[in-house]
Image (cartoon, rainbow, N blue to C red):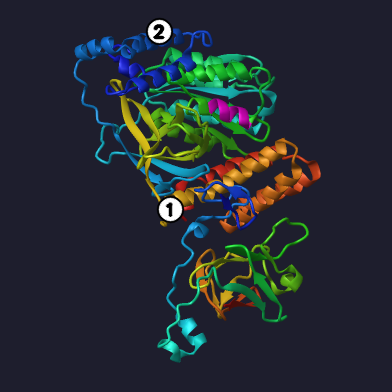
Amino acid sequence: MIICPGCGNKEMPGALFCKECGTQFTNINRDPTLTIPSSLADNLLNGQSNDSEHIVPPTPDDASLSLFLVETGEVIPMEGLTEYTLGRSAEDQPILPDIDLAPYHAYEYGVSRLHASIKIGQPYAILTDFDSANGTQLNGQKLSPHKPYPITHGDIFSLGKMKIQLLVNR
Amino acid sequence: MDDSTFYDRLGLPRDATPEEIKHAYRQLVLRLHPDTNVNKGETELFIDIQQAFERLSDPKKKADYDQQLPPEPKVISPLYLNTYYSQPSLVRLSEPQLIYGLLELNIQPDTNLWVTSTPLNISLVVDCSTSMQGIRLDTVKLTAIDILRQLQPDDIFSLVKFNDWAELLITPGSLADLKSAEMKVQLLQAGGGTEIFKGLEMGFSQVDQFRSNQRINHIILITDGRTYGDETNCEKLANQSSALGIGISALGIGSHWNDKFLDHITSKTGGICKFIPDGGDIRNSILEEIARLGSSLAEQINLNYQTSQDVELSSAYRLQPDPSPLDPVSPLILGYMPRHGTMSLLFEFVIKEIPKNVTQFVIAKGILNIEIPRHTVRTKYINRIVFDRKITTEPAKEAPPAVILNAMMMLSIFIMQERARDEMSKGDFDSATRHMEKLATHLLQKGEDDLAQSVLNEVTYIRHNQSFSEEGEKLIKYGTRSLLLPARSGE
């Protein structure tokens, strides 16, 4: 039995997608103890000198991710899903992003209703812009829409003008 | 049927097993039994099949027959098949499990037997009810005249108009006088109701009269309305058409025609059903349909299949050409194969139990039948298909192949939409709305903004009216269906 991490729906083993909510299962069926080569960003974070005591970073499954809203100082934990959509809910539209930024003045910052997604993956997460009206920037660089960009601990990206930092807690 | 062997009649290869002979016979009987079908031409077909089975089911008679059979003409199927699976192997489990198989049919690259287009034997059956009045009928008329002018000498064409009754406007014989045929089309007027059976019946009688092995035999129905009370007759006619190798396709204009009904009728014959929304390009849709038929290598490709014990084919989809769900019963009516292109089919199998002591498990096997009309004869080809996997103790760690993953991604969107429509028809508005919202989110993620917008509009409509709008439901159904085309999911 596969229990969908998105909605708790039960599917038979061998299912590739949840028929209830469309969540893809292939990532969670796989061996969860992948070892990931440490990236340059990791080395920077850990101090460049510790090459000798090379630590294999934990898998994304073990690390818990959260989003730090730079302007307001709020922290939004990311738990339970393998992929999160970011956006803002609006009264007239029934779009439901997994992480709703509406309470954080998303409209004023120029966040689209369905702006981008963060998928848990190597090294920690993958950021994809959904061709949003005001675009997504990663460390100051504008992202091409619908293209996946790897992000890691400490990366700052902005949805429109809303600055968000990815935090990885080990 | 002059030189056809008893094996041909049952759609079997000469090395068919007794089990396969019995299976093929049973399926044909179900379709053609004289008690249920008393139509012209079918009783003879039934007798042919009966005769074939009597010989082939008796081992002694079969052996005698095989002796006197002339050596099998060397026909190499022009198709080659690729099979993909969602998992490289199966693991024994104490609960039912799923496996997906994707079957791809391609034409051998060195095949040059069908460079020329196939001549057509078609009947255009045009709804002339009151609602067709104006731009709809005017466009159909102009397009029909274009078709008349472009017909090839080998083509056979008739035009039937119908409302409360049917009238044969253009007979294949009358085409010598093109001017008067064009005039007849020009003078078509709208008025009255939509009795689809009357139109189909007359179109059928025309195509059947000129039915030939060298041609693509097809009925094209153009309608914008619903038929009432004659659905069962239409269904019988579709069964009959299918048995005789006549396809039926439908083009539905606007929002009021019955999509479920016409999907059902056309899919029985391997035909397709297209939705032309208000303001859509009627002319282009008709011409595309004619072009599609002309460029078909074969129509009505069938897959006669048997699943192993404790295995069920839970659903089947044609992804390419013309994505569509398929009724998962044997024989699967797969539809047409384009002269240039691929057919790909996705199968979802539920495996309830894997027998002990096997290392290789046959999930299902089948016989693929394809008849290719050519200038001289219609040649039958047969491909055997086996879906099987080895049994391992550890689950495989490889990710499913991209073709399957991409197809399933789009399929999960299509299924969500089917679910929402199903829930709505059962009056479960909350679940339907929830699924529609999820659907919109997924569509936006895939960059399908227009379709997502249609879904959102529909959610608003549902909130106010507690039902789908006729137009919106069709837009979403045919819109998500077209996403299944592999070319798009590769983006």
Q: Cα distance, mark 1 to mark 2?
A: 51 Å
**Is residue A22 positioned above or below B29 on the image?**
below
Percent x, y for residue B212? 37, 17
In-front residue for pair A12/A18: A12
Region in magenta: B259-266
Chain letter of the residue beneath label 2 in the structure image: B
Q: Residue at 53% of width from left, 27% of height from top?
A: B266
Do marks 1 and 2 share a subunit?
A: yes
Q: Residue furthest right?
A: B464
Of badges 1 and 2, the one in the foreground is 1
Mark drawn on residue A150: none
Label ID, residue B47:
2
Q: Is residue B373 above or below residue A4?
A: above
Residue B150 in the image: above or below residue B199 = below
Q: Where does the image place residue B348, in percent across and percent down from the top left?
A: 49, 40
Q: Quadrant location of the N terminus of chain B?
A: top left
* Image point (45%, 68%), residue name: A34
From where the camera sits, is residue B154 visible? no
Residue at image position (52%, 31%) is: B327
Q: Nearer the viewer, residue B35 or B80?
A: B35
Secondary structure under tag 2 reads helix
Mark 1, residue position: B395
Q: Amino acid at mark 1?
A: Pro
Farthest bottom residue?
A49
- Type of the residue with mark 2: Ile
Q: Quadrant of residue A85?
A: bottom right
**Along the line of sight, the residue nearer the viewer: A118 or B215:** A118
Parent chain of label 1: B
Q: Where residue A88 appears, x then y in whole percent?
A: 70, 65
**Element under disc 1:** loop
